[in-house]
Image (cartoon, coloured by chain):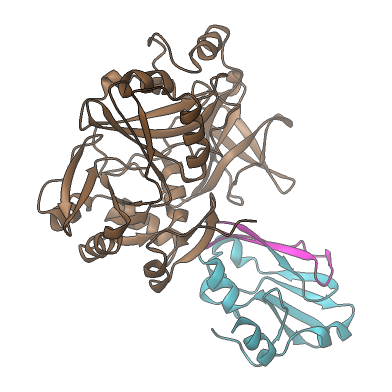
Chain colours: A brown, B cyan
Amino acid sequence: MESPRRTVLFAQQKALGARCINFGGWEMPVQFTSIIDEHQAVRTSCGVFDISHMGEVFVSGPRAFDWLQRMLANDLAKCPVAGGQYTFLLNDRGGVIDDLIVYRMAEDNFLLLVNAAKIGEDVAWLRKHAVDGATIDDRSDTMSALAVQGPEAPRVFREVFQCEMPARNTFVALEKCRGAVIAAGTGYTGETGFELFFSNTLAGDVWAAVLKAGAKPCGLGARDTLRLEMCYPLNGSDLSPDRTPLEAGLGIFVALDKPDFIGREALLAQKHSGVPSKLVALRMTEKGPPPRAHYPVLVNGQEVGETTSGALSPSLNEGIAMAYLPPALATPGQAVQIDIRGRHFAAVVEKKPFYRPSSARAA
Amino acid sequence: MNVPDDLKYAETHEWIRIDGDTGTVGITDHAQNELTDIVYVDPPKVGAAVTAGQPAAVVESVKAASDIYSPVDGEVIEVNESLSAEPALVNTSPYENGWLYKVRLSNPSQLDALKSPDDYRAQIG
């Protein structure tokens, strides 16, 4: 097995007591002190996550826009310069290769922020479909990134950059420590906050500046419970090449009215015939072990699906999970059972999301 | 990490306190510190037979479910009921209030195969 990769902040994080796990081929902090403490820090004050493992792929050139309109499922025409948009790379069957944020750096220059475990596959897929006039530049190895999230994030931003935090789904290009930093009003926790993208050479200084401004170092454990409370999908768990965004309940990020994009025909057919299953939010209504991925979900003793993600929600102190269920069962209020080590625990289909952050701004 | 002198230890980070022919089993301070944030404990059933080196209980932290292996063969005679309401006792009091179950030993000679406090201290470094 290949030895896991490390971000340039690895040593600094180890020195802060980070405990690491392998995530998508990367040795990353899962927690520093406690997942629950870090989760609460993001919900009530401010936390910082090293997300340098994620991929930064630039696409530029006179045909960049037209080509990406065909490669990505959302409508790029609705993403202005200095804006960001959640979107998908789909396969021909409409299945999810990756979910990502595209940032429009200029009319003809785009930054794709992709999942760590999918960088190679995404870039190979893009190159396979490459056209003249759209240059693909994978800078994942030379760029680092931080996500700073929580109600105190705007104050942290002002302290670090001496200006106001960019609005949700917009970004600004700034200078910090004599280097260029892209600062975007995006995140994966549901709280207000920002994400920073910059050269590896700046990573130590930017990390230190954010900590000094009061952000608490957080690991992937809290990142996972935070995103699950919001029902934000994790590719590889809740999304897969065999599931479409329509099945995942993410149809609003797919522009079926665009004339053409990879996967469109399959999605149109699925929309016509109806989806075979829907990704639902499940909340345990009975005290029991925390649900986790790949636990069977039953209705009246019959297995109807399995969980794709699960955790004890630190905010609700209840077990929460997501699962693909037949559409007839995918209605809030539907009672189900989750099989945990052979015992059945009561749960109910919930309206998404599980949690509504106090600091979230209107999208 | 705290490693009390009056206990025997398994390489898989369980401890056992012997009192006559019964033993009280829990996980070590080192183990609870590694797991952190214990949110659920699935104890064995009273009357169940447990086997040395085989899973006897499950302790769940926020991030993972971990099997707890019985240090000895025997019959479970009591489980720590207070853990269902307060699983974090395993974190805050791993050797006292956070014990997991009591077992009547069927093969006390197995205790010889367990680690002394010094050997366990050496193991966890």
Membership of B38 in magenta stretch: yes
Residue A230 versus residue A156 in the image, above or below: above
Q: Position of residue A120 (x, y in %)?
A: 51, 40
The residue that appears at 77% across and 61% down in the rendered structure is B45
Q: Position of residue A281 (x, y in %)?
A: 51, 34
For the C terminus of chain A, give its image quadrant: top left
Q: Position of residue A39 (x, y in %)?
A: 39, 55
Membership of A146 in magenta stretch: no
The residue that appears at 47% across and 45% down in the rendered structure is A116
Asked if one can make out residue A149 in the rendered structure from this viewpoint, the answer is no
The residue that appears at 29% across and 64% down in the rendered structure is A204
Q: Position of residue A180 (x, y in %)?
A: 20, 50
Q: Is residue A227 left or right of residue B70?
A: left
Residue B90 versus residue A210 in the image, above or below: below
Q: Is residue B70 left or right of residue A310?
A: right
Look at the image and give the residue range highlighted in magenta.
B37-66
Residue nearer the viewer, A124 or A338: A124
Residue A121 versus residue B21 in the image, above or below: above
* Quarter-of-image position of residue A1: bottom right
Asked if one can make out residue A282 in the rendered structure from this viewpoint, the answer is yes
The residue that appears at 66% across and 42% down in the rendered structure is A295
